[in-house]
């Protein structure tokens, strides 16, 4: 009878320790999950801010202003444009000139 009581007491203590251990692991897992979800929310907010900044920086008016102010760029007018004829274009224009001369 004493052996049975010792055996049952040992099993009870073992089960109690396993229960405490499993509860501790569950709580630790829950805390890790909460941290990961908070980090995911933080990254989502940061991603939205980056998309907003990208949209703002991609506006044509801002690009034009930066090009003029910082890079000292100027728009090119027709008087400063150089047109090149490719060989195919030169043949077509020569062909149309010769047909006009006839």
Image (cartoon, grey):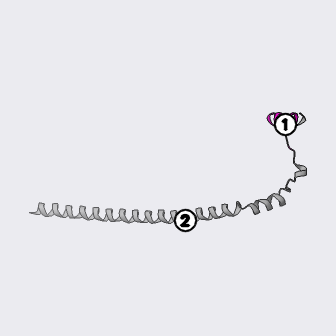
* Near-viewer residue (29 or 21): 29
Residue 25 left/right relative to 53: left
Q: Residue at x 81, y 36 (%)?
A: 92
The C terminus - image quarter: top right
* Near-viewer residue (23 or 83): 83
Q: Residue at x 72, y 62 (%)?
A: 59
**Other residues around mark 2 within 10 Å, as few (<14) / some (14–19) / many (≥20):** few
* Near-viewer residue (9 or 74): 74
- Label 1: state its secondary structure: helix
Q: Is residue 94 above or below residue 16?
A: above
Instruction: Please give the range of residues in magenta.
Output: 82-99
State the predominant SS element of the stretch in magenta. Answer: helix
> x and y percent of residue 24 in the render?
36, 64
The N terminus - image quarter: bottom left
Q: Earlier in the sequence, mark 2 or mark 1?
A: 2
| Residue 86 colored in magenta in the image | yes
* Circles 2 and 1 in contact, beta carbons < 8 Å: no
> x and y percent of residue 68 in the render?
83, 59
Q: Which residue is mark 2?
A: 42
> x and y percent of residue 100 in the render?
88, 37
2 vs 1, front mark: 1
State the count of labels: 2
Q: Which residue is mark 1?
A: 96
- Label 2: state its secondary structure: helix
Q: Residue at x 84, y 36 (%)?
A: 96
Spatial separation of the CA atoms under disc 2 and disc 1: 67 Å
Q: Quadrant of residue 51?
A: bottom right
Q: Residue at x 12, y 60 (%)?
A: 3
* Near-viewer residue (97 or 3): 97
**Other residues around mark 1 within 10 Å, as few (<14) / some (14–19) / many (≥20):** few
């Amino acid at each position: 009878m004493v052996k049975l009581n010792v055996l049952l007491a040992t099993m009870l203590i073992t089960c109690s320790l396993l229960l405490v251990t499993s509860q501790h692991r569950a709580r630790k897992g829950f805390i890790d999950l909460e941290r990961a979800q908070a980090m995911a929310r933080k990254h989502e907010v940061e991603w939205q801010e980056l998309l907003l900044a990208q949209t703002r920086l991609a506006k044509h008016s801002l690009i034009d202003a930066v090009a003029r102010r910082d890079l000292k760029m100027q728009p090119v007018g027709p008087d400063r444009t150089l047109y090149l004829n490719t060989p195919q274009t030169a043949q077509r224009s020569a062909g149309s000139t010769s047909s006009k001369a006839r």
